[in-house]
Image: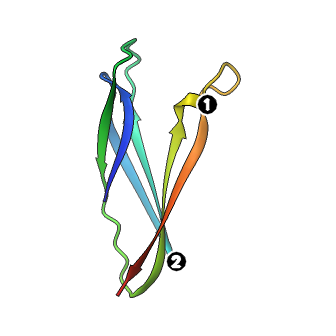
Amino acid sequence: MTVLTYGNRCFSAADTEVRIAAQEAVVTPYDRDPGCPERDLKQIEHSATVRFTEAGDYRILVRGIDASTRSSINLVGDTVVVVRTVTIR
């Protein structure tokens, strides 16, 4: 699967973690932030393989950070989770 994140032109894709347990996969993309002051946004593409070995309904959760929620109190930002259900036949 492909997951898009956003960052300024200095950001680049780092690891994309995939954890599978029971009927669920959790995908967490990470970006490298070198700390440059650029403000132009770009998409950063992350690829991950999610493999379920048996037929059935599964949930895929993609975890990320909502940068718009960053503040002096919340330096990282709030966690956002997007959930999709897939059926394997």
The image quadrant where one finds the C terminus is bottom left
Kindly check if marks 1 and 2 are in contact, taking CB atoms under 8 A apart as contact: no
- Asked where in the image residue 38 lies, by quadrant, the reply is top left
Whether residue 76 is visible: no
* 56 lies left or right of 78: left
Q: What is the x, y in percent for residue 46? A: 31, 47
Q: Residues within 10 Å of mark 2 (few under 14, many from 20)?
A: few
Whether residue 54 is visible: yes
- Say if 34 sits above or below 49 in the image: above
Residue 69 numbered mark, or none: 1
Residue 77 numbered mark, or none: none
Amino acid beneath label 1? Thr
- Say if 89 sits above or below 75 in the image: below
Quickly name the residue at label 2: 22
- Say if 44 sits above or below 85 in the image: above
Amino acid beneath label 2? Ala
- Asked where in the image residue 69 lies, by quadrant, the reply is top right
Does dot 1 land on a helix, a strand or a loop? helix
Q: Earlier in the sequence, mark 1 or mark 2?
A: 2
